[in-house]
Image (cartoon, helix red, strand yellow):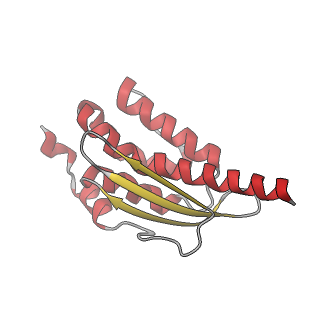
């Protein structure tokens, strides 16, 4: 039953979104929308000198599952590299679509959403924050490359 998805832990994560809002001067911004349900995430990032997330903010308008995924992301994303975020996204897709175990390491708490695999209509909302974060980091890295080329 879908009510089983909304455990106390999921609802707590959804209600306590770390790094909510927008950054005043982001290096990169990403936005994703889940077309089926309209869940939306806008993410701003600033990277450190190694290309890892130094500052992060997210504006998420999603169902409880999308908010919970964004909550986990917000708890662990500062210090993460592009590859760590991409690996977490890929592991989430594997968990949701093909029975994978889900992310490990820094983003292992996303496994709390494993039951979402049984509800394909909820998959996209659970991924919007990860996808927007990847887009934001890629935008920041692209901007840095352009600036370095212009120097």
Q: In the image, what residue occupies the spot 39% across and 64% down? A: 59
Expressed as whole percent of the image width and height from the top left, the position of residue 117 reads 30, 32
> Which quadrant: the N terminus?
top left
In-image side of 109 versus 104 (left or right) = left
Q: In the image, what residue occupies the spot 65% across and 51% down? A: 81
**Quarter-of-image position of residue 83:** top right
Expressed as whole percent of the image width and height from the top left, the position of residue 39 reads 30, 50
Q: How many marks?
A: 0
Q: Is residue 133 above or below residue 16?
A: above
Residue most extreme to the right:
151
Q: In the image, what residue occupies the spot 21% across and 45% down? A: 5
Q: Which of 4 and 56 is in front in this view?
A: 56
Residue 31 visible to an observer of this rendering: yes
Q: In this view, does 36 lie above or below 75?
A: above
In-image side of 21 versus 78 (left or right) = left
> Which quadrant: the C terminus?
bottom right
Expressed as whole percent of the image width and height from the top left, the position of residue 42 reads 43, 58
In-image side of 53 versus 42 (left or right) = right
Residue 101 visible to an observer of this rendering: no
Q: Which of 105 and 11 is in front in this view?
A: 11
**Quarter-of-image position of residue 26:** bottom right
Residue most extreme to the top:
98
In-image side of 86 versus 60 (left or right) = right
Expressed as whole percent of the image width and height from the top left, the position of residue 62 reads 28, 54
Residue most extreme to the bottom:
24
Q: In the image, what residue occupies the spot 32% across and 56% down? A: 67
């Amino acid at each position: 039953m879908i009510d089983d998805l909304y455990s106390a832990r999921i609802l707590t994560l959804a209600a306590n979104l770390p790094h909510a809002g927008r950054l005043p001067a982001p290096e990169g911004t990403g936005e994703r929308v889940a077309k089926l349900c309209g869940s939306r995430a806008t993410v701003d990032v600033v990277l450190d000198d190694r290309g890892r997330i130094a500052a992060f903010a997210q504006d998420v308008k999603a169902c409880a599952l999308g908010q919970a995924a964004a909550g986990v992301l917000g708890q662990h994303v500062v210090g993460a590299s592009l590859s760590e975020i991409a690996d977490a996204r890929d592991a989430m897709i594997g968990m949701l679509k093909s029975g994978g175990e889900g992310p490990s390491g820094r983003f292992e708490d996303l496994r709390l959403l494993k039951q979402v695999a049984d509800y394909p209509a909820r998959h996209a909302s659970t991924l919007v924050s990860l996808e927007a974060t990847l887009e934001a980091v890629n935008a920041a890295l692209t901007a840095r490359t352009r600036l370095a080329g212009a120097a």
